[in-house]
Image (cartoon, rainbow, N blue to C red):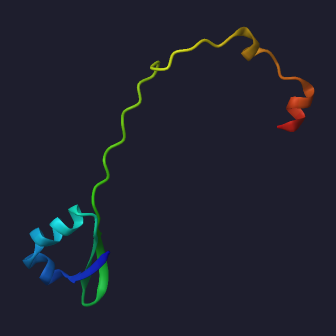
Amino acid sequence: MTLTVNVHEAKTHLSRLLEQVHAGNEVILAKAGIPYARLVPIEASPVRRQPGRLQGHVGEAFFEPLPEAELRAW
């Protein structure tokens, strides 16, 4: 749900608007009816990647040149 609010009203009811944003709604801040900004909930930060977590082994065949037919396909 998107709600458009005038800046003066937003200043008066900021806590209420933040609760609505936290619930997943979007609030558009407008000045004289012209949209200026958007309040949206913050997405959870992605999980940090850890190199080497899924360890494996690359064989010697990986480094050999591709056959000519395979190169043409690329």
Residue drawn at (7%, 78%) of the image = 12
- As drawn, the residue found furthest toward the right would be 69
24 or 10: which is nearer to us? Answer: 24
Image height of 41 relative to 72, above or below: below
- Quadrant of the image for the N terminus? bottom left
61 with respect to 18 (left or right): right
Residue 17, picture quadrant: bottom left
61 with respect to 24 (left or right): right
Image height of 30 relative to 53, above or below: below
Residue 65, picture quadrant: top right
Image height of 60 relative to 3, above or below: above
Residue 60 placement (x, y as % from top left): 72, 9
- As drawn, the residue found furthest toward the top would be 60
Residue 32, picture quadrant: bottom left
Q: How many marks?
A: 0
Residue drawn at (23%, 63%) of the image = 23
Residue 10 placement (x, y as % from top left): 15, 77
- As drawn, the residue found furthest toward the bottom would be 32
- Quadrant of the image for the C terminus? top right
Image height of 67 relative to 30, above or below: above
65 with respect to 58 (left or right): right
20 or 69: which is nearer to us? Answer: 20
Residue 57 placement (x, y as % from top left): 60, 11
Residue 48 placement (x, y as % from top left): 37, 33
23 with respect to 59 (left or right): left
- As drawn, the residue found furthest toward the left would be 12
